[in-house]
Amino acid sequence: MKKEAIGVVLGSREATPLEFWIGIQDGLVRLDDVVWVEADHGGLVVRYYGMVDRVHKVLEGTQFDSDTFLAAGHLIPTNTAYVAHVTVTRLEPEEYLPPDPGSPVYLARGDSLNAALYYDRMKQKLPVGFMRNGEPAFVNLAFLDGRQGGHVNISGISGVAAKTSYALFLLHSLYTSGVLEDAASAKTLIFNVKGQDLFYLDRPNRELAPEERERYAAMGLAAEPFASVAFFAPPRLAQGQGHITASSHRAEGVRAYHWSLVDFCRDGLLPFLFSDRGAMSNLGFLIDHVTARLAALAHGQEGPELYVDDWPGGPATEADLFDALGRVRIDRFDQLVDYVEAKLLGDEAEGEEATGDARWTARQHTGTLQAFVRRLRAAARNVGHLIRGDAASNAPDPLGSSAQINVVDLHNLSPQAQMFVVGSLLRRVFGAKESDRHRGKVFVVLDELNKYAPREGESPIKDILLDIAERGRSLGVILIGAQQTASEVERRVVGNAAVRVVGRLDAAEAERPEYRYLPGAFRDRALILPQGTMILHQPEVPVPIAVQFPYPAWATKASEAVEDVSDEALKDELGL
């Protein structure tokens, strides 16, 4: 490939082994251009690779600002100095000697570009977008799939930074590039937190332009939607017992998810209804104790309803709520709350000491018991349609599903119900990987990390996310997390991400310590990044890289979706 000299190393400014300035005489040099220069140090030839991170133009021969007007009118002699600052990314060989002023500087292409960004050392290069020069950008898969590092963290302003779009593009690259070994056995759990735009991932995008298809092809990716996707939505509210349909705008292929009362008790899911541990610091022991009592109660029961023999039932208990043994049947979550209240408080009236069952109260003060019951009763209003005794559990099982990608809708749920669903599913996935019940990689896509793993306070969900961040990569659980403000997310969750991505940032947020890994010029650029452009940092490359990613090949809303008229889809829609 022909070398293109773009300038020379300047002698008017310091040149060091780690940075230098170049003067440009002909052509154009822009931010993110990758360059190289060679210097002969007494027979030792050192090649310097670097990236342009600052570009300046200035008039030489002027003394005052107003001289610019004279120069524009050709009334005084001036020259335009066009200079660029280069941050060195690599030296070959690794001899820290400064480059010589006057040495010609060349644009890096082909092998020299691969050397400058360490692509030549990456055994498995995952396409992650395009650089400014039009060349594909890559991430070392070993730093994403858990072998040398793991996890991806994406920050940016909601609605502008395209965090979810980029996370989906990374998944598409993982599944279709051929780089990920055993991609067929990999599973993905995606939490849909805004609208139902992710409910069309399996549909082609009718607005995908031909030039966008060419961009996919240039990266070795197929311009097609995700091939194996299952969709889950919460049940509709105000449905009768036994009638459960999904609250989804999509007409077919969406399953309603819920937990049976027996599974809720047996699996110990109660703590996820108390997500704010900071507000319940005095209740922690009681929550654990009641969780254990509920698990013991559910032991041996087939469900989905619960039967108890130590409670006469609520005030409106009907005859058909008793079984042949005279046990009371509990088939609604609010009934379970009534039962727990009776076991904790007994016949206690307001202001009196509790007379509950000593096996349940754990010797806690009446005020603590009352606080627990109040919170549990408030939860019943939010999760009663998710935890029920009129049908067997239909909770999403990402690792047991025949689909590779499982999308779980949360957007219509209350914050408390969202916490419950996220916590329950994360524990299920992480527990299965800990017990080695699934050998393939598992990717978890979760936005709004500042809600689920906040910097302040403690919660069961935060504990699980910390486990995933710190131990997940060794187990093959990779978190692709996103948030508007990394400064409000638990440091260890963000800090354990090997690959960090930034979209458009708020000016105040960009000054936070969490973004110190970005040089100042990149932090400034993050304030004006257009949608579809991200700044990506990975361990093996010493400088961040600005990348653009193509328009989604999958539909991102109903109006973009190409209708599925296959026989299978029609049968599903008609219920055949």
Image (spheres, rainbow, N blue to C red):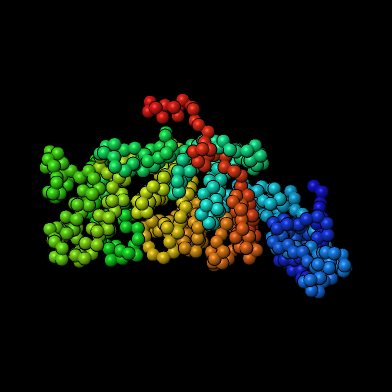
Residue 452, image x and y in percent?
41, 57
* Residue 40 vs residue 534, the one in the foreground: 534
* Residue 158 vs residue 66, the one in the foreground: 66
Residue 320, image x and y in percent?
14, 39
Residue 186, image x and y in percent?
49, 42
Q: In this view, does 494 lie to the left or right of 372?
A: right
Q: In this view, does 472 lie to the left or right of 67?
A: left
Residue 575 appears in view = yes
Q: At x 42% / y 39%, what residue is drawn? A: 249
| 480 relative to 74, above or below | above
Res 450 → quadrant: bottom left
Res 517 → quadrant: bottom right
Residue 262 appears in view = no
Q: At x 55% / y 50%, what residue is drawn? A: 162
Residue 130, image x and y in percent?
65, 48
Q: Is residue 51 left or right of residue 352?
A: right
In what quadrant of the picture does the C terminus appear? top left
Report the label total: 0
| 68 relative to 204, above or below | below
- Report the residue that reaches farthest toward the bottom: 63
* Residue 568 vs residue 526, the one in the foreground: 526
Q: At x 40% / y 37%, what residue is drawn? A: 254
Q: At x 53% / y 33%, what residue is drawn? A: 562
| 69 relative to 115, above or below | below
